[in-house]
Amino acid sequence: RKEVEQDPGPFNVPEGATVAFNCTYSNSASQSFFWYRQDCRKEPKLLMSVYSSGNEDGRFTAQLNRASQYISLLIRDSKLSDSATYLCVADNNAGNMLTFGGGTRLMVKP
Amino acid sequence: NAGVTQTPKFQVLKTGQSMTLQCAQDMNHNSMYWYRQDPGMGLRLIYYSASEGTTDKGEVPNGYNVSRLNKREFSLRLESAAPSQTSVYFCASSPEHRSTNEKLFFGSGTQLSVL
């Protein structure tokens, strides 16, 4: 089982839609969680950290569910510019590095 | 402010050839990393340097060596390239390793093909 798993998608949504991605992690002791965004043929960039209490940044909301070991990313009022791959990140089993999921591809259509 | 700069952007090697990927950051970060990204596999950590003078193996270190030349620079060397090393390589840096401040800043990547 992969340490961090994501549905690869693609998620095809119309502009203005709300879309949510989940990501599951296997290490119950993981402490750090992040969402990164990666545009096609570009480097990943930090989108937001995920805190236990959840956090919101404009149209983006991240949640952590420790009991079920998943994190989620909610995007409201999707824009064409939100089209990208979203990478979920968590501590690994050894606790000495971050592990990336395979990414979820989002395509926002006009 | 350039951030993380890695070179080259593209490279084609023949099996058995060697090469070094260069990476430099100008953000005064303590920690630096080398990742590879393959379709469907996500980013996998090859080696990291938590601080100047230290290096450690990541998830997939076989076939690679690294050098933390100084605080700014962290190079990745392939001594004898193999087709399995065809991938996109990303260098990254962060202010501190394994802390709440561990947010990664990535270079623009190197597309490496080994024939």
Image (cartoon, grey):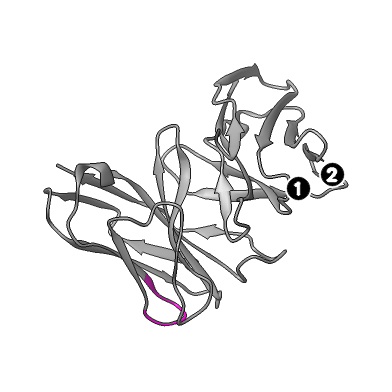
Frontmost residue, B96 versus A11:
B96
Position of residue B109 measured from the top left corner of the image (x, y, whole percent)? 38, 52
From what the image shows, is residue B25 above or below residue A74?
below
Callout 1, which amino acid? Val
Q: Horizontal and vertical percent for residue B60?
A: 40, 52
Alpha carbon distance from label 2 to label 1: 6 Å
Q: Residue at x 64, y 65 (%)?
A: B98
Whether residue B71 appears in magenta in the rendering, the answer is: yes
Quarter of the image for residue B86 reads top left
Secondary structure at numbered mark 1 = loop
Which residue is identified by label 1?
A50
- Residue for point 27% across, 56% down: B63
State which quadrant residue B78 falls in. bottom left
The residue that mark 2 highlights is A54
Q: Is residue B76 above or below residue A28?
A: below
The magenta span reads B69-74
Point 45% across, 37% down: residue? B41
Circles 2, 1 touching at the beta carbon (< 8 Å): yes
